[in-house]
Image (spheres, grey):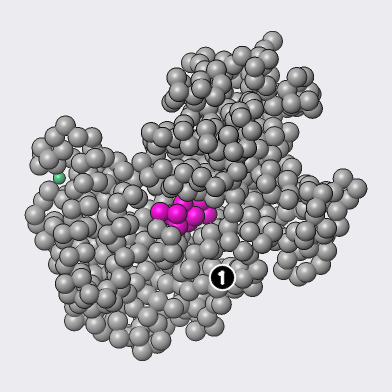
Amino acid sequence: MSEGYRNFTTAVYCTVGDVNSIKDFAAFEEAFSHIEGPVHIDKVYLEYWRGDQWATKEHMLEVKKFFEDKGIKTSGGITTSAVGTEGFESLCYSNTQHLDDLKKAVELCAQTFDEFIFDDFYFTNCRCEKCIEGKGSRSWAEFRMAQKLEATKNVVMKTAKQINPKVNVIIKYPQWFEYYNETGYDLINEPKYFDSIYTGTETRNPEYSQQHLPKYLGYFIMRYLESAAPGRNLGGWYDPFDCNYNLTSYLEQGYLTLFGKAKEVTLFCLGALRKEGPWRLMAPAMGEAFRECDEYLDKLGNPVGAAAYRPGRARGENDLHSYLGMCGIPFEPSIEYPTEAKTVFLSEGASADPDVFAKMKETMLKGGECIVTSGFVKKNSEEFRQFANITVTDRKAVVHEYAGTHNNGINLDGRVPGFDPVMISQIDYCTNDIWELAAGYAKFNNFPIVLRARYGKGHISIITIPDNYGDLYNYPADVLNVIRGLFTNELPLKLLGGSGIMLFAYDNDTYILRSDLPYSDSVTLEFAPDVKSVTEARRGFELKMDDHRQIRMPLMPGMNAIIKVNR
Ligand SMILES: [Zn+2]
């Protein structure tokens, strides 16, 4: 086995199918070397139950011993999926047989292991007659969250702790955090009952797969869930599915999970990563990516970025943060309102907090900046007028050229082409009361892309989000530079360029630039006056600023450029 990593540990998840397929240990040893040769493995999660498959305790103990004899730690696993024909079918928590099965799986795990994890099927999408009756007049989200919490307290945790008081019970949350409540996941109450949580950082082909997940999501959710259970978010988990189109896209999940400071990385799953099928290359390549990250992860401080407030019951403008992350905006998300932050970003989901306007007011009166989306304004059209008289109308415009300003909006400057035309909502605002920092041109008219006004000692900014969030990538560099500038004005550097370059920021003035473009390109970094020098962090050589305090950084697809800013 390869040597352990200094900055993180790794685990491989073994489904019950994987566990049951291990019959001949000598043959398995040979097959397993395909993964543990290139990847150092600290732990395996061994699953007892999934759908209609179970492992026997007798067999589980043999498999457990096999791994432990190799020096690999073992934990249990449970997948609460039902066997069905309509997409992913969950357990029905109104069904006593399903609850008995859940209890049995928890008993087996707690008897066999000191730790076990729930794969991210611990949700419910059941609409059977019993569930319809149980729901009553509540929303599905309210009903399902209450039903699940009951199962967590009285079936899972009670059973587990009675058998093994020191057992660490982990809930792994899926990467689709925008839809948690609807299926019974609850970031506000659930983590209080589980010992630990785990983060699904899976991203898929962003264009051609069902879940439309921009790559930045792998980093964003790692940080967001850390805020939901500080110190108890044990790691990040991803799989190779929908990544066959581009091997780098598989590795990228690993990079972003680790850039988000995961303590442990779990690779799902043993069967998929073995030598068979199209995934043969995944484990060897991931081993090399792990080695690469381990060389520099200790040079990164704690993640920082524009404070993105997303309450636990947020809904709306789904995955917008990750689309903006793909435009080079570094976020530090938070489930609580970030009262200390100087820059706070609020998308539509932030309006789930009934006190959000009072909190925003306080931020701005203290001199801070609140950045909101057109979706947030639309959702709160009446209340928002206390800051500025702005209406997101139902009228649309298709814009394809853009303008900036050199004097805070008194005049618009230039006529810059975008990529493809972009459909936006027309925002009605009062000229001379509020100013456009960037605008989109349509025929004989123009519409705001960025509006900004003073409020108290601070500012309120409004960004027009295209109807298709993916069209953010069609905004040209001149527009994205204005947007990015709002989010990153506390950082000692500005990223100037188009979309497709991610920026990760850390509190020791270390930064990672990563290109997701399918071609090589360069970006310009511009540094604040107090920056004395800039070094390439991995090899330590100086990157020289030009007379405009700028550095032109060439970036290849898939490359991680790490720089240290010295002030
Ligand atoms: Zn049901």
Identified by mark 1, the residue type is Phe
Graded by Cα atoms within 10 Å as few (under 14), some (14 to 19) or many (20 or more), the crowding at tag 1 reads many
Q: Is residue 227 magenta?
A: yes
Asked whether mark 1 and ligand 1 are closer than 8 Å, the reply comes as no
**Extent of the magenta region:** 218-228
Foreground residue, 289 or 450?
450
Residue displayed at 61% across by 30% down? 456
527 left or right of 149?
Answer: right
Q: Nearer the viewer, residue 136 or 30?
A: 136
Q: Quadrant of residue 211?
A: top left
Residue at the image point whose x is 71% and y is 55% from the top: 556
For ligand 1, give the image quadrant.
Answer: top left
Element marked by disc 1: helix
Quarter of the image where one finds residue 129: top left
Q: Position of residue 319 (x, y in %)?
A: 47, 41
Q: Which residue is mark 1?
A: 290
Vertical placement of residue 82 versus 50, above or below: above
Which residue appears at 16% of the width and 59% of the height?
Answer: 154
Please identify the residue farthest to the top as the structure is shown.
444
Q: Whole-percent x and y of residue 265?
A: 46, 67
